[in-house]
Amino acid sequence: EVTRNIDGGSLDAKADEVVRISARPDWGRYRLDVESPDADGPATSVLFDAGWYVEASTTETPDALEIALDKESYAAGETAKLKVSPRFAGEMLVAIGADRLYRTINVSVPEGGTEVEIPVDEAWGAGAYVTATLFRPGSERESRMPARAIGTTWLKMEPGKRELQVSLDLPEKVRPDTILNIPVEVADAAGEEAYVTLAAVDVGILNLTRFTPPDPVDWYFGQRKLGLEIRDIYGRLIDGSQGAFGKLRTGGDGPGESSQGSPPTEKLLALYSGVVRLDGNGKAEIAFELPQFNGTARVMAVAWTKQAVGHANGDVIIRDPVVLSASLPRVLAPGDQARTIIEIHNTDGPAGNYQLSMSGTDLVTVGSVQPEIELAAGERKVLDLPLAANRSGTGEMTFAITLDGEKMADVTRVVKVRPATLPVSNRMEIPLAANGGTIRLDGELLAQSIPEGASVSVNISRRAGFDVPALLTRLDRYPYGCAEQTTSRAMPLLYLSEFETPASLVEGEDIAKRVNGAIERVLSYQASGGSFGLWGPGDGDLWLDSYVTDFLTRAVEKGYTVPEQAMKLAVQNLQNTLAYTSDLAESGNEIAYALYVLARNRRASVSDLRYYADERINDFATPLARAHLAAALALYNEIERANRTFSSALSLAQDPAAVNLARSDYGSSLRDGAAMLVLASETRPAAPQVADMMELVASEVGKRSYTSTQEDAWLLLAARAAQEGNKAIRLEVNGNATSGAYVNRLQGSDLASGPLNIANQTGEPLTAVVTTLASPRDPLPAGGDGFEITRTFYNLDGTEADLNAVRQNQRFVVVMEINELNSWPSRVLVSDLLPGGFEIDNPRLVKSAELEGFDWLGEVETAHSEFRDDRFVSAFNRSSGDDRSFAIAYVVRAVTPGTYTLPAASVEDMYRPQFSARTATGFLQISKAE
C-alpha cells in the first residue's frame, strides 16, 4: 500500500477545550496525525475510514480483493452497490450465494475500481454472500504469472415483518421476597396466535458464564456459513515472493480441568416463566416470585408467531432498603474456630437504631452482637464475629435486620460442616442361630465414628454376601463421576424393581431422574466418532466404549430415551474398532465385550462368535471375556455352544493361577465372577453353571475389605440371581414379625434414637451382614499400601511454609508427591480435602516454569482435574512404562482467620482400591491480615 499526504494545517488549542477539524475526504482509509511544533512535545494519531468499511485483515495478501457494500442491510427489492478497489485492472466475476448459487454478474474493472449494482431478491432469506473474483493475464512488468484476487462480504437482508417488536415495562428497582410483575407487549402480534417466554437471571451469573441474551432474530436472520466451495488451479500459479507469512490462529487444548463447587451458599436468581400465550392484543403479564437476593437481574423475553420472532431485555435492580450480606467459610470441620463477616449498608433506609438477629442451624455457633446498631443514611458497617463449628451436616443460617419491629432485610446462607476425614467402610458378618438367634444394633456400633452422615446397612438373606443395601450405599456416596463410575452407579438402577429391596434404599432423586441424568452425562463424554472418554471425549478405550454402550442398550430396553444418533454412533464405533482390532493376546477382553454388546443390538457376526468359541477360546485370558462370548452366543440361540463356553469361563475363574493384577480392563477376579454370574443368569434358559458361579462370587466377597465401583455395580446386578429361597425366612424386627429377606439402610441418628433388635425365627441359621460407612472420630495415621504420598505447603518463593503462622490473603503452593510401588498400568486418583479458611486461588495446576524455586517440580500429564470448593481432585492414567514417582501442585489462599483441622491428602488406584495411601491430619492457624 502507498500512503499519500492529503491535507494539512495548523491550529491553536487550549488544554481545557475541544477543537474540531472538518474535511470531506473521498472513500478510503485515512490517518490523522496531530503533533506539537516542539521537538519533544506531545503527538498522537488516529486511523479512520471514510465511505464503506473494509476490514484491514482481509487484505494482508496480494490475492485479496477489497470490496464493500454501501449499507449494512437491505430490504427485498432494493439495489445494493458493491464498491470494488482493486490493485490491478481485469475481468471480474461476482457470485451471489449462500447454501447454493443465486446468480452471477460479469464486470470489466478498470485500475481505479468500479461499482456494481446488485438487485436484492427476497428469495435470499437472511442474506447472501457476495464473492468477487478479479482476473488478469500475466504481466512482464509486475509478474511472469497471471493474477487473481478474491474478496467476500456478507449482504444482510432486513427481517422486515418477520421481526416482532417486543417491549417490557420494567420497574427500575424492586425489593427481594416480593412479586415482580412484568407486562409484556408485542406490537405486531394483535389478533395473532403469539407466545412469549421470560427469564430473569442474576447479571453476575451471566457475566461469569459470558451468556448473551437470546436473540432469535439473529439466529434465524443472521449471517450464515458460506455453503459454496470455490475450486480452481490457481494454487499452482501463486507467486511465492509476495504476501505475508501465515499466522496460526488456534491454540492447543489442555488436559481436562473443571471447577466444581459445593451447593451454593445462597439462593441463586434464575427464574423462567415457561411458554406463555399472549392475549388477543399481543399482551401478557408475567409474575416472578423473587427470592432473597440483592443485585441486578436481567430480564430476557423471546416472542414468536407462526411468521415472525422477536426479543427484548432489560435490567431490574433488586435490593432491600438496607443491604445485608454475610460471609462464611465455604466449608468447616467439627471443632474449627473461624470468623464470619456481616456487612450492613443503609442504601435507602432511614437513619436509626437497627437490630440484628440470627437464627437457624445449630451446626455452628455465631458470637453475639450488640443489641442495637446505629446507622446513618448511606452508612456502611462491618461486623466481624466469631464462628465455631459444632458438628457435621449441612444447614442454613438466617441473618435479619429490623428497625422498630419492621424487617428491613434478611439473608440466608448455607452452612456446610464436613468431617475432616473421609468415610471408612466396615463390614461385619454376625451369625444368627436358628429359632431365636438375635442381633442388637445401637449407638455403640458407631462409638468410634462421627454419627452425622453415617450410614448403616443391614442385610439378612440366604446369600448375605450379596449385600444389596451396602452396595447401593457405596455407589450412592461415591463422590466422583468419570464415564465408568457414572455408568456403574446408574446401570443397577435399571433393575431395581427386580430386587426384594424397597426403592427408598436409593437416596435422593427418583430413580428415573438419576438414570436420565447418567445418560446425559455419559453422552457428554462421547466423541464425534462414537467412542467414550473416561473424563471427556477422546481418552477412552474399547472396553469402556463397550461398557457405556452396554448401559445405553440396557437403558433403551428398559424404556429410557437415548438419542438415536448417539446410540447409532456408539454401536458403529464398536463395529469400526473391531474391524481393525484382532490381536486376542493384547485385546481379547475388549473384543469379547464389544461382540457381546453388538449381539445385544443384533449387530454381531455369528460366524466370528462361533470361531472364537470353538477354535480360539483359550486365547481369551479372563473369565469375563469367555462369558461375554457365551452370552453373545446365547443371544443368537446357540445354547449348547454357549453353555460349553460358560463352562470354560467358570473353570478359568476357579483357577487361582489365573488371577492377574496387571490387567487394564477396570476389572478383578471379583468383578469377573459377578459379571459372569449376571450374564449366565440373564440367558434364557439360565446357564447350568449359575449355582457354582454364585458360590464362587460369595467366596470372593468374603476376601475383600475394599471394592471398586466396577465390583459394586456387577455385584448389585448379580444379586438378582441370589434371591431364591428368601421367602422362607422368618424374622422378628423390634417385635414385629416379617417374612422374606431383611434389607435396610439406617442413618447414624436412627440408632442413636433407638436400637434395632432382630431375631431369627427361621428353623435354620442365618447370617446378618452389617456394613457401616462413616468418618472416624480420630483421624487415621499416615500410611497405606501400594503408594507413598507426601504433602508440603510452600511459600511462593519456594521455601517451606509454617502453617502455624499463616496470614490472611497469603498464598501457598500445595505440592503432593506420589510414589506408586507397583509397575502395572493403573488409573490413579489423588484427592486433597481443603481445610476451612483455605480456598483454591487459581483453578489450574502449577507448572515448574511458572514460579521461581519450583524448577524441580517437573511435568506430569493429568487425565482430569477438579477444583472444588471443598477439595482438589486429579486423575492420572499411568502406563506400565511411566515413571512411578510424580508430583502435582496447585495454589491456595488463606481467606478466613481462625483455627482449622487440616484434612489428609490421599491417593488410590481406582480399580484396585486395596492399594491406597494418605498423609497425616494436621492443624492450621490463620491470623487476620495487618
Image: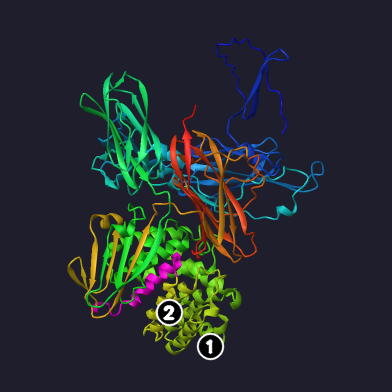
Q: Could you say which is closer to the camera, residue 76 or residue 698?
A: 698
Secondary structure category for the residue under label 1:
helix
Secondary structure category for the residue under label 2:
helix
Q: Could you say which is closer to the camera, residue 689 or residue 784?
A: 784
Q: Which residues are magenta?
A: 704-728
Name the quadrant of the N terminus.
top right
The answer to whether one can see residue 266 in this image is yes
Residue 922, position as x, y percentages in the image: 48, 45
Which residue lies at the image location 30% right of the left edge and 29% below the top edge? Answer: 320
- Which label number is shown at residue 764? none
Residue 761 relative to residue 927: left or right: left
Q: Residues within 10 Å of mark 1 (few under 14, many from 20)?
A: few
| Mark found first going from the N terminus, 1 or 2 | 1
Residue type, numbered disc 2: Leu
Residue 260, position as x, y percentages in the image: 45, 48
Which residue lies at the image location 46% right of the left edge and 57% below the top edge? Answer: 524
Q: Is residue 902 magenta?
A: no
Residue 77, position as x, y percentages in the image: 46, 42
Task: Place residue 24 in its image quadrant.
Answer: top right
Residue of label 1: 614
Residue type, numbered disc 1: Asp
- Which label number is shown at residue 696? 2
Q: Which of the two discs, 1 and 2, sits closer to the camera?
A: 2
Residue 163, position as x, y percentages in the image: 38, 41
